[in-house]
Amino acid sequence: MLSLSNIAKVYGEGKVKTRAVNGVSVEIGAGEFVAIMGPSGCGKSTLLNILGLIDTPSEGSFLFMGEEIARANEKRLTQLQREHTGFVFQNFNLIEELTAAENVEVALIYRGVPGKERKARVAEALEKVGLGAFMKHHPARLSGGQQQRVAVARALVSRPKLILADEPTGSLDMANGEVVMGLLSEAMDGGATVVMATHSQTQAAKADRVLHMLDGRLEGMPPGPARTPSWAEDEAPRRNVAAFPLPWRRRS
Ligand SMILES: Nc1ncnc2c1ncn2[C@@H]1O[C@H](COP(=O)(O)OP(=O)(O)OP(=O)(O)O)[C@@H](O)[C@H]1O
Ligand SMILES: [Mg+2]
């Protein structure tokens, strides 16, 4: 389903360049549950952003369901993202102006789901994460853990083939963490592929495969190029994803 070959993401300009992802090659099959572990700053979010078509790689080849991402234009990337992916952002990335229900509904509007069905599915998704009573609350009136659960509901409500979850239980107590893990596992029973960044050994143990990341590389991979090629020189610095509420794709 996902095939990465020597993928790199370079941030910054001139002398202060960071190779946040540095020569990653990996295959992820349909229906697989893959956990990514590694210390803070090792590149987990950057890699998930690439896998979820939020960000494009600076180097390398990425086949997303057989399609070469380097050759896809902005419109196609947005289309693939909306049709096939659900993303739980590390910083939740909810739209401040919208209620919890409206935030979740956005994912269904993108999929062209009719209004009546949307309402029912949104209510069901928020019930499942224990937020049935908070449908009309705006993010500012929700706790961090509640916002994270809205983000989970938004990612899962459209029943995407590919779920990217960036530390999806990082702000949750144990009971709510279990609920979220249960929902991910339910999605996998329905055939979804899940790639999840986590610091939790317990959660990683549930995955089919654990990828260990360090300094932008996956364990067991040879070092990438030491020098940034000239065509990656003018890569714009990453902008805060929260500044791009809709669509979720970053422009680079
Ligand atoms: N916009 C940016 N400009 C420059 N460097 C960046 C930018 N965003 C991320 N980085 C760098 O890329 C590297 C990887 O960051 P990333 O967010 O992917 O790490 P992470 O593994 O998700 O960390 P955490 O566990 O803290 O979430 C870090 O060194 C970080 O400083
Ligand atoms: Mg991260």
Image: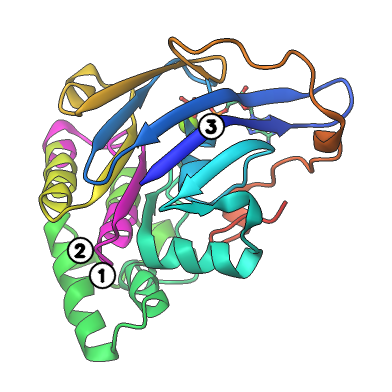
The residue at the point 69 percent across, 38 percent down is 58
Task: Give the mark nearer the N terminus: 2 vs 3.
Answer: 3
Number of marks? 3
Q: What label does residue 126 carry, if any?
A: 2
Q: Could you tell me how far apart the alpha carbons at marks 2 and 3 are, in whole angstroms?
A: 38 Å
Q: Which region of the structure is painted magenta? A: 150-177
From the viewer's perspective, is residue 199 above or below residue 161?
above
Task: Give the mark nearer the N terminus: 2 vs 1.
Answer: 2
Q: What label does residue 3 carry, if any?
A: none
Q: What label does residue 5 carry, if any?
A: 3
Q: What label does residue 135 carry, if any?
A: 1
Q: Dot 2: what SS?
A: helix
The residue at the point 87 percent across, 31 percent down is 230
Q: What amino acid type is highlighted by mark number 3? A: Ser
From the viewer's perspective, is residue 118 above or below residue 71?
below
**Which color scheme is applied?**
rainbow
Q: Residues within 10 Å of mark 1 (few under 14, many from 20)?
A: some
- Horizontal side of 92 relative to 53 (left or right) equals left
Q: Dot 3: what SS?
A: strand
Q: Position of residue 111 (x, y in %)?
A: 36, 76
Q: Dot 1: what SS?
A: loop
From the viewer's perspective, is residue 88 above or below residue 168?
below
